[in-house]
Image: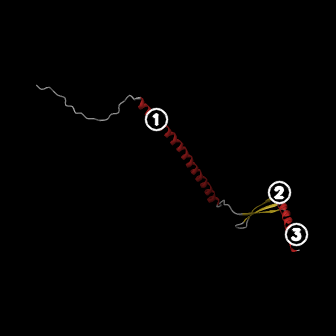
Amino acid sequence: MAKNKDLIQKTHEPHVLPCKLTERDRADAADKLATALQRVESLTLEKKAKVAEFKGMIDNQAERIHSLTIEVKDGIAQRTIECELLLNYSKLTATLVRLDIGDIVEEREMTHYEKQMKFEFEKKGKSMKGKVEAEEAEHDKGEK
């Protein structure tokens, strides 16, 4: 009788198996680890910067929404309008007038600072008067 022979087929295929690392392999792995850790740290900082940037953009839009909501609700918008400030030194009052439509925006007593401006105005006025008189005198000399 014939002996039973095993039928064997050989194939080559990869398998992940534990392997003892050499010192060089360990050094390479340490370098890769350090690089990966630096990259994570860098990405984390980038993420924080982007989060802050987007938070700022969202906050700006929230402020805009708030302002627009008030405008729609009240029917009034806050805008920069060219105005004229009239200081009446006789009555010690200040009047703020809108130049676009001529309406008086505010009438009030002059501030301490505004009252002091009169003295500066008077000083400049006197110095201008002196200059005019000096120029007139110079002119008169030239005609003689």
- Viewer-closest of 143 and 85: 143
Report the residue at 40% width, 29% height from top. 22
- Foreground label between 2 and 3: 3
Task: Specify the quadrant that holds the C terminus.
Answer: bottom right
In primary-sequence order, the first of circles 2 and 1 is 1
Vertical arrangement, residue 27 with respect to residue 69, above or below: above
Q: Are marks 2 and 3 in contact (CB under 8 Å)?
A: no
- Viewer-closest of 39 and 110: 39
- Foreground label between 2 and 1: 1
**Label 3, on which residue?**
137
The quadrant where residue 3 appears? top left
**Label 1, on which residue?**
31
In primary-sequence order, the first of circles 1 and 3 is 1
> What coloring was used for the rendering?
secondary structure
Give the SS element for disc 1: helix
What separation in Å lies between label 2 and label 1 (alpha carbons)? 73 Å
Graded by Cα atoms within 10 Å as few (under 14), some (14 to 19) or many (20 or more), the crowding at tag 1 reads few
Q: Are marks 1 and 3 in contact (CB under 8 Å)?
A: no
Give the SS element for disc 3: helix
- Viewer-closest of 93 and 51: 51
**Label 2, on which residue?**
116
Q: Is residue 90 visible?
A: no
Graded by Cα atoms within 10 Å as few (under 14), some (14 to 19) or many (20 or more), the crowding at tag 3 reads few
Q: Position of residue 124 (x, y in %)?
A: 83, 62
In primary-sequence order, the first of circles 2 and 3 is 2
Q: Amino acid at mark 1?
A: Asp
Q: Amino acid at mark 3?
A: Ala
What separation in Å lies between label 1 and label 3 (alpha carbons)? 91 Å
Give the SS element for disc 2: helix
Report the residue at 63% width, 59% height from top. 71
